Image (cartoon, rainbow, N blue to C red):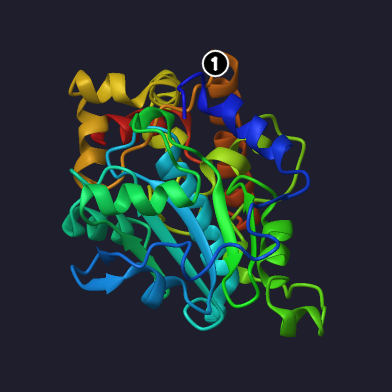
Amino acid sequence: MRRHGILAMTVAAIAAVAGPNTGEAGSGPWGEGYIPNLQVKNQDGETVRFYDDLIKGKIVIISFIYTSCTDICPLTTARLSQLEDRLGDALGRDVFMISMTVDPKRDTPEKMKEFSSAFQTRPGWTFVTGALEDIRAINYKFGERSEILSEHRNQIVLGNDATGEWQRDSAFSDLNRLEMTIHSLDPKWRDQVRPPAADATNKTGFALSEQPGQALFKKICAPCHTIGVGDRVGPDLRDVTTRRDRAWLAAFIRNPAKLRAQHDPAAMTLVEKFPAVRMPALGLGEQDASDLVSFLEAEALRLHEAQNQTPLTAHERGDHAHHH
């Protein structure tokens, strides 16, 4: 997780998983006796056995995060929350999600609970912490071996303990393919192959177009934000260009931590409203930020026109921004 620009890492992650990387356990060495059955705590403070209670006989999706992370961890978790929506009722019944901390010293169950709540996670998604040596022992078995937080692995692990099928993937890969990969771990599903059903929860409130910034929005913004659908992990961005000055938006997109450090009033308001997960530094350049702002502006106009509403005038935008 070296910080050389989150956008570059995201693009690299997508390229790296054009085809899934089948894991070390494809032939079955993982499972009971390999995966530690140590005691851990979930986000509700309950003590469980890692293998017996969370892995044994299950299809699982495992990610590695820490709650104070300011770059890739929130993006990974937000992306998985989109996958959670797609899984629907299968989550907690056929498929289980596990987010393992790599910082158990600081990630108490309370912090893990706050983090999971920010993403509105449902039953079937467990956030795991515990004693330092136990968490490290578990993570080590899944290939997470660095003790430097900023260098922990970005990949997720997918597995079916019952069949011994395991592989690595990326939360930033195509969601359709990722969903199919997870379902295909279930032999019963493989025997009844069918295309995934349309899922209204995946609609983010914007139409496909060639508008500059749209691809960026879909990959790095949509996991946390919608346009006209409502708050998600972060605020709904419909009409944000009428509420905030364009230069401020570009500056915040490029370096939100800088504005928070300066105690910028608007940035601090966002901290108060969304305390558990703060917008990370995305590694975007000036042109990327400008393209994103242009896309948000165009989407606001499109939505107003679609609903036969008159967009705010420049004078009204100025008054609105002044009062917010």
Q: Give coordinates of residue 162: x percent, y percent.
A: 59, 78
Q: Secondary structure at mark 1?
A: loop
User: Relative to residue 216, is residue 138 depicted above or below?
Assistant: below
Q: Looking at the image, which residue sits at the far top?
A: 286
In-front residue for pair 180/235: 180
Give the residue number, with chain letter if any, for mark 1: 285
Whether residue 262 is visible to the viewer of this picture, yes or no, is: yes
User: Relative to residue 180, is residue 259 depicted above or below?
Assistant: above
Q: Give coordinates of residue 133: x percent, y percent.
A: 25, 48
Circle 1: is it few (<14), some (14-19), or many (20+) Cα within 10 Å?
some
| Residue 74 lies in quadrant | top left
User: Relative to residue 54, is residue 271 depicted above or below?
Assistant: above
In-front residue for pair 292/245: 292
User: Relative to residue 40, is residue 22 depicted above or below?
Assistant: above
Q: Quick one: quadrant of the C terminus?
A: top left
Q: Give coordinates of residue 235: x percent, y percent.
A: 38, 48
Q: Looking at the image, which residue sits at the far front?
A: 33
Which residue appears at 46% of the width and 23% of the height?
A: 2
**What's the residue type where badge 1 is placed?**
Gly
Side of 37 relative to 217 (left or right):
left
In-front residue for pair 120/8: 8
Which residue appears at 81% of the width and 73% of the height?
A: 195
Side of 131 relative to 319 (left or right):
left
